[in-house]
Amino acid sequence: MQSKTLKIISYGAVAAVIAMMVAGTVVERLHGAAAAAQAVYHHPVFIALWAVVAVAGLALLLRSGGARRPAVLALHAALLLILAGALVTHLTGKSGSIHLRVDEPCSSFELEDGRPEILPFSVRLESFDIEYYSGTRRPSDYISVVDFDDERVTISMNRIGKVAGYRFYQSGYDEDGAGTVLSVSHDPWGVGITYAGYLLLLLSMIAYFFEKDSAWQQNRRTLRRPREPERRRSRWPLALTLAGLVLLGLWLLKVFPKGPLMPVLRSPLLVIHVVPIIVSYTLFALMAVLGIIGLLLPADKSEHLQRVERLILTPAVFLLTFGTFLGAVWANISWGSYWTWDPKETWALATLLIYAVALHGSSLPPFRRPRFFHVFCILAFVAVLVTYFGVNLFLGGMHSYA
């Protein structure tokens, strides 16, 4: 198959995936998460489109000589591994919830579709307790002490109970304090495969910056070439960088709340998850500003700005990728699932895919044109704004506190 045909298939599938994800968030807002899962996220067409993205993307990479670049090949292999893990979880994983009352044994849990699932052991709630911040009535943690046959396990927010391949997560409680609700997950293969993909993705992103012939290194070397004296004296890039740092500081002040945190946020992963995403958003904002300026400049200076935007693009996308997938790990620790198609998750992934298309811009003729690239940087930032502000205002979800 010719490279041009592979490009059409690959980028067409990516565009279709993004469109379906956006539609899924709207369906969830109007009809609920179950309807969105049935109509979009678990639909065979959606799964098939991801398969097309994976296969066509890999074929395009190999055809363009990507096999000779270890970091790039590892990046795409990691994404394939993550998709494979997600598929295994979808096909073989089981999840649901169990409601326990003190001293009342139970040996089954309810699946998401309402059917009962027998457990290979007995479960009994020994006690449930709410811890509060000192001097307040604001909860700092919810703690269930549970007996699994002869094994006693303490389960709380950000603390999983693991028994015989099953994982239990604190998710609710009875108002009288004598009962608890635990999320249950049994996914012996999918999580391991997905986590292996996350690890390979992290290592390959780091390696990419040191790969001699990577597009990022080539662009960096181009920008470091001596320029005419009158251009070297320009101070506006420094001013824009400082403005970006100020914007970053303001964003960080807004993101981290003052005072007691809700129990699910009491984790060291909060900072590690949020800061890379906020830094990436700041870099995308800087690219949008450069895009506006680039449209106002003469052709030669506009082309130089495009190279600056390309240099910023790679770390911005990698930081967003790291923050998003670390959030998936945290979600698996707190909520029992590393990906739930929550609107914030979905829009973050859509934003990532949009900017990832620009990373492959050298293979797409329009992205080689400076003015087109500037317009892209401006319009793509709309996805960032929707993810950061619009989801909270209009779509809600489990991240509505963020």
Image (cartoon, rainbow, N blue to C red):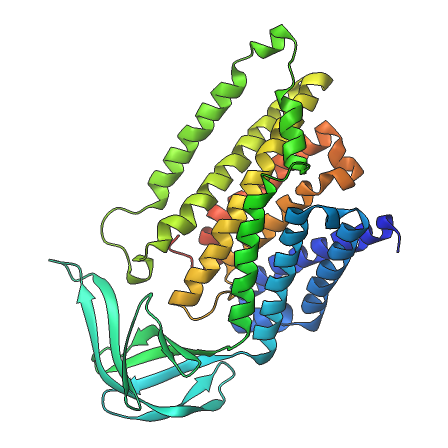
Above or below for 230 versus 392: above
Occupied quadrant, residue 27: bottom right
Above or below for 388 versus 400: above
Q: Return the residue nearer the eye: 276 or 251.
A: 276
Above or below for 312 versus 388: above
Q: Residue at x 67, y 48 (%)?
A: 70
Give percent across and percent down for residue 346: 55, 58
Relative horizontal placement of residue 282, taking residue 253 as reference (left or right):
right
Give percent across and percent down for residue 387: 51, 49
Relative horizontal placement of residue 88, taking residue 186 as reference (left or right):
right
Occupied quadrant, residue 364: top right
Total marks in image: 0
Whether residue 346 is visible to the viewer of this picture, yes or no, is no
Q: Return the residue nearer the eye: 59 or 34.
A: 59
Above or below for 222 versus 70: above
Q: Residue at x 28, y 90 (%)?
A: 150
Occupied quadrant, residue 106: bottom left
Outermost residue, right side: 2
Give percent across and percent down for residue 294: 64, 23
Q: Residue at x 63, y 33 (%)?
A: 217
Whether residue 299 is visible to the viewer of this picture, yes or no, is yes
Give percent across and percent down for residue 125: 26, 85
Outermost residue, left side: 135
Q: In the picture, which quadrant includes the N terminus? A: bottom right
Q: Residue at x 57, y 47 (%)?
A: 205
